[in-house]
Image: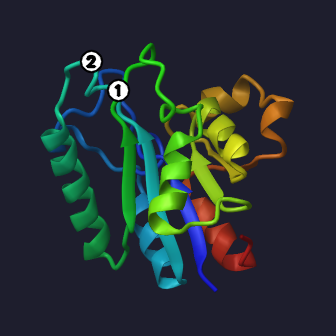
């Protein structure tokens, strides 16, 4: 039986930036995130990434630049034995009215359809309220990490609409707990 995880990118795998990650040169990993992905991969998890990338709609980067960033992340992850099976992203801006921009669940539904991932109970690890809202709406288990925007999200209080989200210091501590308990 396959085990699944879905991750947000900015603030979970790599540092978030108010000016957006526009190139490989601006990519800064969150300590322990790449090795956490490798450990989870080794334990049999199929891992996916769902990320808002409104920098495309804002004209700050194009899809080629985004592909280069994801290729670089893939290379770093694979160098330590990890694997991201699929990357999906929303290229739209906040006012575009699309179905894929979180907090809407469209990206998660896309992962489910394209990769045959059951969403009910699958952990979705993010650092923002909109990640948790998308997870809950799609039937995923909302998990908050305190990296990126996570500390602010937690300090603001988690609304009842997202349920009892598990909270971890970072992706590495999530991986430790997940591998220790085998919780899915």
Q: Is residue 65 above or below residue 45?
A: above
Instruction: Find residue 67 and report its horizontal and vertical position in percent.
Output: 19, 49
Helix, strand or loop at label 1? It is loop
**Quadrant including the N terminus:** bottom right
Helix, strand or loop at label 2? It is loop
Q: CA distance from mark 1 to mark 2?
A: 6 Å
Say how many tags the image has: 2
Q: Is residue 38 above or below residue 51?
A: below
Residue that badge 2 annotates: 58
Q: Residue at x 60, y 31 (%)?
A: 130
Instruction: Find residue 30 and report its horizontal and vertical position in percent.
Output: 40, 49
Give neighbour class at mark 2: few <14, some 14-19, many 20+ (Cα, 10 Å).
Answer: few
Residue that badge 1 annotates: 54
Q: Are marks 1 and 2 in contact (CB under 8 Å)?
A: yes
Give neighbour class at mark 1: few <14, some 14-19, many 20+ (Cα, 10 Å).
Answer: some
Instruction: Find residue 101 and report its horizontal and vertical position in percent.
Output: 48, 31
Q: Residue at x 81, y 28 (%)?
A: 159
Of all residues shown, which one is farthest toward the top?
A: 95
């Amino acid at each position: 039986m396959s085990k699944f995880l879905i991750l947000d990118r900015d603030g979970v795998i790599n540092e978030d930036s108010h000016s957006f990650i526009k190139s490989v040169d601006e990519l800064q990993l969150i300590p322990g995130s790449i090795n956490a992905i490798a450990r989870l991969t080794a334990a049999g998890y199929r891992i996916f990434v769902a990320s808002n990338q409104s920098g495309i709609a804002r004209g700050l980067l194009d899809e080629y630049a985004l592909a280069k960033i994801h290729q670089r992340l893939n290379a770093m992850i694979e160098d330590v034995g990890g694997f991201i099976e699929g990357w999906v992203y929303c290229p739209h801006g906040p006012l575009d009215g699309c179905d894929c921009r979180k907090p809407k669940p469209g990206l998660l539904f896309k992962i489910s359809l394209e990769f045959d991932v059951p969403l009910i109970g699958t952990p979705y690890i993010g650092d923002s309220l909109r990640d948790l809202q998308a997870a809950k709406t799609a039937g995923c288990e909302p998990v908050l990490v305190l990296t990126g925007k996570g500390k602010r999200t937690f300090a603001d209080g988690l609304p009842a609409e997202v349920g009892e989200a598990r909270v971890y210091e970072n992706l590495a501590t999530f991986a430790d707990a997940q591998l220790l308990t085998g919780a899915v």
